[in-house]
Amino acid sequence: MSHSKNKPFAKRSLGQNFLVDETVVGNIVSELQLNVGDTLIEIGPGRGALTEKLVATGAKVIAIEIDRNFVPSLRAQFHFDRNFSVIEADVLNVGITEIVTDSDRGSVKLVGNLPYNISTAILERAALERNIFSRAVFMFQREVVDRISAKPGMSERGYFTVLVESSFEVTRLFDVAPEAFSPRPKVWSSVVKLSPKPPSAADEPAFRKLVSAAFAQKRKTILNNLKSVVIDAETTLKEAAIDPRRRAETLTLDEWLALYLASQEKRPDSLEPPDRLIKRPKRL
Ligand code: SAM
């Protein structure tokens, strides 16, 4: 295989655009606000641009890299650093719960310059496992950050925005130009900080199902979208004080939660199968 500076060539299929701008690396590390005893999970260390600075802080660093060509050079580079380990795996097949020890809990942070093709999947997983970590600092393509930070009324706002907003306090930190990477991507990137929120819906799968259904066809009104999943959708919207003619992207998070509560209100306490959770019993 060909090497440049003894490092493997970048693979576009794995979103390999490596950070070469030291200032950006430093800014990402400082946003993590590392404390002694923190455990960091780095997703996609690649050539180790971020890893080097992370390991130097003394925090325990667990890196997860899918590309087996990088794993030996990472092991060699950090051979003497007892606070570093690398797992060769697809991050989507590794649960955070599986890799942190009980004593790490409460001090876990996530970091990564993430490949575009798995950004949605990583965010979904992070939302599900958010009780295990206290902060995540991620770099995404700017378009992904536009989507997750879209305010009510913006066209980028969708199911995914509401999912992320209900799970995290999202702070958009800074944009990064293509020149900060090698090879240079075609688009800008953005760095965000995600601070986990406690569950706001008692039944999160039911909440997600409701939101997903409401965004099913963006050009339809919320009433028309909800009809397929909520029995008596009109009354449910009325109880949540939401005009049935509105479109899903105009709702605030509080309104989504009110809608969820209204849809759950008359749900019997009995053990309903999950696919029926948001249906209301028919009125007599
Ligand atoms: N952190 C390095 C940096 O900033 O220079 C590399 C960032 S590069 C954008 C993304 C990295 O994620 C690559 O090293 C790539 O091999 C790795 N990667 C891609 N898909 C992955 C997956 N499913 N699981 C783990 N790592 C993955």
Image (cartoon, rainbow, N blue to C red):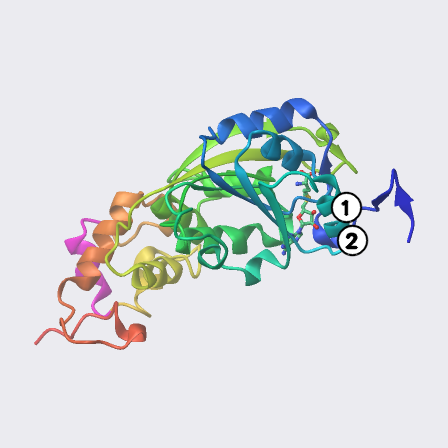
Tell me which residue sits at (31%, 69%) in the image. Answer: 229
Q: Report whether 142 appears left or right of 33.
A: right
Tell me which residue sits at (44%, 55%) in the image. Answer: 218
Residue 282's spot in the image, x, y percent? Answer: 15, 75
The range drawn in magenta is: 231-243
* Closest to the observer, 218 or 73: 73
Q: How many marks?
A: 2
* Residue that protrudes farthest toward the right in the picture: 2
- Asked if the magenta segment contains residue 138, the reply would be no
Q: Is residue 177 visible?
A: yes
Q: Quadrant of residue 153?
A: top left
Tell me which residue sits at (69%, 35%) in the image. Answer: 49
| Secondary structure under the numbered disc 2 in the rendered image | loop
- Asked if the magenta segment contains residue 240, the reply would be yes
* Residue that protrudes farthest toward the top in the picture: 23
| Residue at the disc numbered 2 | 69
Height in image: 140 above or below 222? above
* Disc 2 crowd, CA 10 A, few/some/many (<14, 14-19, 20+): some
Disc 1, ligand 1: is the CB inside 8 Å? no
Residue 32's spot in the image, x, y percent? Answer: 49, 31
* Closest to the observer, 185 or 211: 185
Circles 2 and 1, Cβ within 8 Å, touching? The answer is yes
